Image (spheres, rainbow, N blue to C red):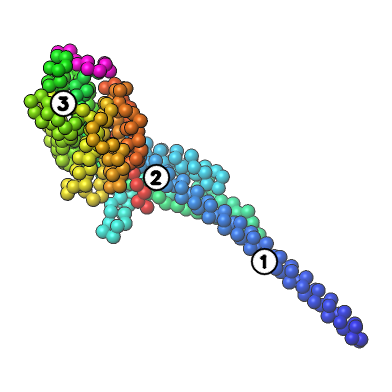
């Protein structure tokens, strides 16, 4: 065999070897590409499942708080899951996937969920994409090349309601003694016009203050019906000055945090028996509430909440928004309620937004009572698992 023939055979061998190598590498490359695509899909679906399950648990816990009904909580969790998509389809749950119970904080900082423990304070949701689930397994694009057709992710989320330390902050400026007509300087029947009416206690049934007192009572009644343990305090604000033969503070702490709601009722009744002159220093009321909610009487695990009512426009002291920003830095949520169309709604919307709270506008006494009842039933919800 000549040297030329040998060289030719070696070249053919190398070409054949290269062809085999390319074929092998091509298979490896396709397998790696398929693996990468499916791994990315799996990660995306896990993220979607986590979001859907968390949302479901939160919705269930919120409904449990608001409705005080276990069946309503389960249905709310199922409905919320169905509004979330995992792998292109809604996450479908059954009642077996939603468990009610109670969560308790452990010494190491973790939360222990006890299924069936009453009173119910937590909702646990199992988001399941297995073959036996309503939504089924998640198909893979290239998995069948590796003899893996699908995968079945599972996510468990628990949302719990928290107890609250609450401070009611009520506007007791002079306008709260007016009647409910919405007309400035219009006092209820039986109360003389300004200036005499200015230095009388507000009318017990026909004044704006009387409507606030009714809403205050409705708030307490709702708290008495919840499973959570809420402590309550009361602050009233106007502006500092000497009126009606006496000196008035911009804000007064009527009663500190207590679990004795009757003592809060008594403090409200006592304030209602005195004149309520002065302007509107909303920030003073917020600052006193912050003092209460950062004091020695607070409970470390309780959510801190201010419920603020005003019927007017801030006109004394620093900006309420500055006070709200300070409160937010201390993890205090402020819900605001404006009563009457003359109130500065936008400012109160901004105050609530600065702390993650809600704003409610009440044009009349009935709407005011409804707003306070809704706030009382809106308990804070957190993911504990």
Can you identify the residue that label 3 sits on? 276
Above/below status of 144 relative to 58: below
Q: Is residue 38 left or right of residue 184?
A: right
Can you identify the residue that label 1 sits on? 28
Q: Which circle marks residue 57 in the picture?
A: 2
Residue 76: x, y in percent?
Answer: 40, 38
Q: Residues within 10 Å of mark 2 (few under 14, many from 20)?
A: many
Residue 236: x, y in percent?
Answer: 18, 33
Question: Can you see residue 41?
Answer: yes
Position of the N terminus, as image quadrant, is: bottom right
The part of the image, by quadrant, that contains residue 187 is top left
Residue at image x 15%, y 35%? 252
The span shown in magenta is 181-190
Q: Is residue 312 magenta?
A: no
Q: Which circle marks residue 328 in the picture?
A: none
Residue 362 vs residue 6, the one in the foreground: 362
Q: How many numbered marks, from 0 up?
A: 3
Residue at image x 86%, y 82%? 7
Q: CA distance from mark 1 to mark 3?
A: 83 Å
Residue at image x 42%, y 47%? 54
Q: CA distance from mark 1 to mark 2?
A: 43 Å
The part of the image, by quadrant, that contains residue 276 is top left
Above/below status of 71 relative to 273: below
Above/below status of 59 relative to 42: above
């Amino acid at each position: 065999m000549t040297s030329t023939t040998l060289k030719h055979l070696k070249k053919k061998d190398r070409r054949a070897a290269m062809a085999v190598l390319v074929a092998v590498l091509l298979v490896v490359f396709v397998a790696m590409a398929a693996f990468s695509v499916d791994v990315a899909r799996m990660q995306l679906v896990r993220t979607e499942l986590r979001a859907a399950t968390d949302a479901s648990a939160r919705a269930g816990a919120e409904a449990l708080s608001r409705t005080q009904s276990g069946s309503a909580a389960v249905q709310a969790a199922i409905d919320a899951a169905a509004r979330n998509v995992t792998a292109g389809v809604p996450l479908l749950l059954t009642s077996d996937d939603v468990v009610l119970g109670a969560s308790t904080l452990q010494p190491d900082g973790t939360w222990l969920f006890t299924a069936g423990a009453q009173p119910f304070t937590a909702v646990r949701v199992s988001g399941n994409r297995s073959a036996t689930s309503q939504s089924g397994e998640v198909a893979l694009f290239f998995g069948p090349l590796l003899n893996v057709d699908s995968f079945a992710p599972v996510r468990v989320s628990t949302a719990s309601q928290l107890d609250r330390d609450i401070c009611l902050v009520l506007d007791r400026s002079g306008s709260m003694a007016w009647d409910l007509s919405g007309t400035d300087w219009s006092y209820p029947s039986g109360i003389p016009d300004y200036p005499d009416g200015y230095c009388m206690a507000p009318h017990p049934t026909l004044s704006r203050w009387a409507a606030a007192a009714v809403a205050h009572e409705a708030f307490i009644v709702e708290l008495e019906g919840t499973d959570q343990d809420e402590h309550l305090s009361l602050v009233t604000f106007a502006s500092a000055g000497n009126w009606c033969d006496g000196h008035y503070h911009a804000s007064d702490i009527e009663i500190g945090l207590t679990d004795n709601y009757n003592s809060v009722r008594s403090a409200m009744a006592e304030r209602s028996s005195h004149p309520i002159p002065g302007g509107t220093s909303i920030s003073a009321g917020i600052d006193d509430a912050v003092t209460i909610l950062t004091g020695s009487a607070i409970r470390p695990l309780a959510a801190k909440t201010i419920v603020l009512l005003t019927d007017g426009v801030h006109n004394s002291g620093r900006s309420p928004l500055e006070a709200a920003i300070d409160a937010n830095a201390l993890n205090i949520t402020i819900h605001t309620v404006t009563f009457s169309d003359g109130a500065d709604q936008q400012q109160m919307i901004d105050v609530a937004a600065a702390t993650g709270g809600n704003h409610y506008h009440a044009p009349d006494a009935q709407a005011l009572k409804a707003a306070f009842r809704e706030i009382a039933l809106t308990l804070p919800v957190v993911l504990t698992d």
